[in-house]
Image (cartoon, rainbow, N blue to C red):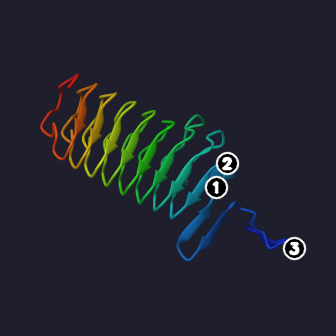
Amino acid sequence: AAELTISSTGAVTVSSGTLTVGSLNIGHGANGDTASTAVGTDALDASVSGSTRNTAIGQSALTALNHATADYNVAVGSYAGQALTSGDRNTSVGDSALGTVDGHNNTAVGQAALNADCVDNNTAVGRNALRFNTTASNNTAVGHQALDQNTTGANNVAVGSLTLDAATTANNN
């Protein structure tokens, strides 16, 4: 059973590593990695010992993260980074941003930005930017639905709302 202690300085410690207030869980994720932070129902709840320095804020943020080398991930927003299991150095901000399972060095900012199982080194800023990106790397999309239909095209840059939104497999644009 979890034990709650309050020190003479007022510090509150929960022996299980997680504090629940109402339906809000606050802690370090599963296995109590003290270098990780989890705030929200089911946030970082599958993490394994060995994965470190992950931050999950929001319902089900980084909920599937479960690989020992899945380090340095940040997810802010409900369901942000929810499918990520083994990727590292990913940043997602926004509801359902970043749908990758094992991608590395990706940045997604905006609702459903980069919301597919992408590979590495992609940047999406804006609602639905790079939304369907699957096996493509090294893409940059800034703007509402910029490159949103891209699935396999690599090394593309799209700036502006709906820029290259119909491109699916084009490279080097």
Cα separation, mark 1 vs mark 2, equals 7 Å
Q: Position of residue 153 (x, y in %)?
A: 23, 27
Q: Are marks 1 and 2 in contact (CB under 8 Å)?
A: yes
Give me the disc on residue 17. none
Cα separation, mark 2 vs mark 3, equals 24 Å
Q: Nearer the viewer, residue 16 or 7?
A: 7
Cα separation, mark 3 vs mark 1, equals 23 Å
Residue tagged 2: 35
| Disc nearest the viewer among 3 and 1 | 3
Q: Amino acid at mark 1?
A: His
Q: Tell whether 9 sits left or right of 171.
A: right
Q: Are marks 3 and 1 in contact (CB under 8 Å)?
A: no
Judge whether residue 81 can be spotted in this image: no
Q: Residue at x 45, y 34 (%)?
A: 105
Give me the disc on residue 28. 1
The C terminus sits in image quarter:
top left
Q: Amino acid at mark 2?
A: Ala
